[in-house]
């Protein structure tokens, strides 16, 4: 039997605040691909277990709840294809603006329920806001957004300022129900060779908006994390400068090494980092990956988790093995955290 001495919430907060902890949280932060769950249902996962929380319980994971916020009203135009835009200029933006920024957006029943689970200590609670690279891109499209940074800078800034004004109202409303333990900004702005914009563009188009919104959550103790895929090694410094406290998921395939980012930014928090591509390569490979992460995890501020969703190439038996080894290394990291305290 494993004797855990902390609640899920206490454990999460202790790790994130660089305090001693009994063991790492056993988390998969992003849920699972349908294809992965379909496969596991054929291989031994009981067929009636389909819900995210039930799956987490089945594998003995710590629970987290992500509160979702509606970003658009009904009737929002859809892009013609993936990556296409719905807005090309200021006049278009004026037309679609009525479909943005729904209000009210906080559902009292949902958040009362989440608050009760959090009070019981059973879950770590988080929510997600759109970031300031992501938001204009959803409106302008991938290519249109890049051009707009040069051709229509004021439009991009107006889009972000409008969103910030809404986000600040949303945060104020949300915190009447509970204080989330962490939050993420949806902000995919790197690919496998680094960031998609320059440091100067980041300073012009992202930093001012982060600086307005972050304090509204940080004053309550919520850990603020940017969710950007790709290689974030270089922009980690830009985010830190803007006041962001952490990054997920630090994709190994994109060349990110959390130990290197930790060396450069010792106070940043990280979630993820475990290379999902080794999960079906057997015990030795999985152990090697945990060993790579252990020195940073033992210092605190790092919650090991799959560095995106577990892929369908991972069998049910592979995942049970991964969880068994995860538990072992989670406890080892806990012992390390108590020695350094």
Image (cartoon, rainbow, N blue to C red):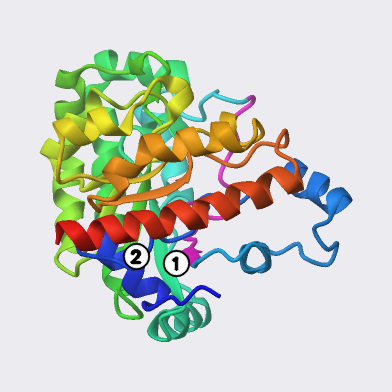
Main SS category, magenta section? loop
The residue where tag 2 is placed is 12
Between 224 and 46, the one lying in front of the other is: 46
Does 202 appear above or below 113?
Answer: above
Considering every residue shown, the one lying at the far left of the view is: 241
Would residue 75 be found to the left or right of residue 187 on screen?
right
Q: In terms of secondary structure, where does tag 1 sit?
A: loop
Q: Earlier in the sequence, mark 1 or mark 2?
A: 2
Task: Determine the residue located farthest toward the right in the rendered image.
Answer: 42
Residue 269 forms part of the magenta stretch: no
Question: Which image quarter: residue 103?
Answer: bottom left
Q: Which residues are magenta?
A: 64-81
Viewport quadrant of the N terminus: bottom right
- Image quadrant where residue 90 sits: top left
Say if 190 sits above or below 72 in the image: above
Residue 274 in view: no
């Amino acid at each position: 039997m494993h004797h855990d001495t902390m609640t899920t919430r206490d454990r999460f907060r202790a790790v994130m605040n660089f305090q001693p902890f009994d063991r790492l949280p056993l988390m998969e932060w992003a849920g699972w691909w349908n294809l992965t769950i379909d496969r596991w249902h054929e291989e031994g996962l009981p067929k009636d277990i389909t819900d995210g929380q039930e799956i987490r319980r089945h594998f003995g994971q710590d629970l987290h709840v992500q509160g979702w916020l509606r970003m658009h009203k009904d009737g929002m135009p859809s892009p013609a294809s993936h990556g296409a835009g719905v807005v090309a200029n200021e006049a278009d933006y004026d037309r679609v603006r009525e479909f943005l920024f729904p209000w009210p957006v906080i559902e009292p029943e949902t958040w009362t329920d989440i608050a009760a689970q959090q009070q019981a200590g059973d879950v770590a609670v988080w929510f997600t806001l759109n970031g300031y690279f992501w938001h204009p891109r959803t409106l302008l499209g991938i290519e249109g957004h890049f051009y707009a940074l040069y051709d229509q800078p004021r439009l991009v800034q107006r889009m972000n300022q409008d969103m910030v004004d809404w986000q600040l109202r949303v945060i104020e409303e949300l915190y009447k129900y509970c204080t989330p333990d962490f939050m993420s900004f949806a902000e995919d702005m790197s690919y496998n060779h680094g960031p998609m914009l320059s440091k100067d563009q980041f300073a012009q188009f992202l930093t001012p908006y982060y600086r307005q919104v972050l304090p509204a959550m940080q004053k309550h103790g919520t850990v603020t994390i940017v969710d950007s895929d790709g290689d974030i090694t270089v922009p980690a410094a830009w985010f830190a400068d803007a006041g962001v406290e952490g990054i997920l998921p630090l994709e190994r395939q994109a060349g990110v090494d959390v130990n290197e980012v930790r060396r450069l930014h010792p106070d940043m928090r990280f979630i993820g980092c475990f290379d999902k591509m080794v999960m079906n390569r057997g015990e030795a490979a999985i152990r090697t990956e945990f060993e790579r992460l252990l020195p940073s995890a033992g210092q605190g501020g790092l919650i090991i988790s799959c560095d995106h969703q577990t892929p369908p190439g991972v069998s049910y038996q592979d995942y049970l093995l991964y969880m068994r080894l995860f538990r072992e290394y989670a406890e080892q990291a806990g012992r390390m955290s108590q020695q350094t305290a």
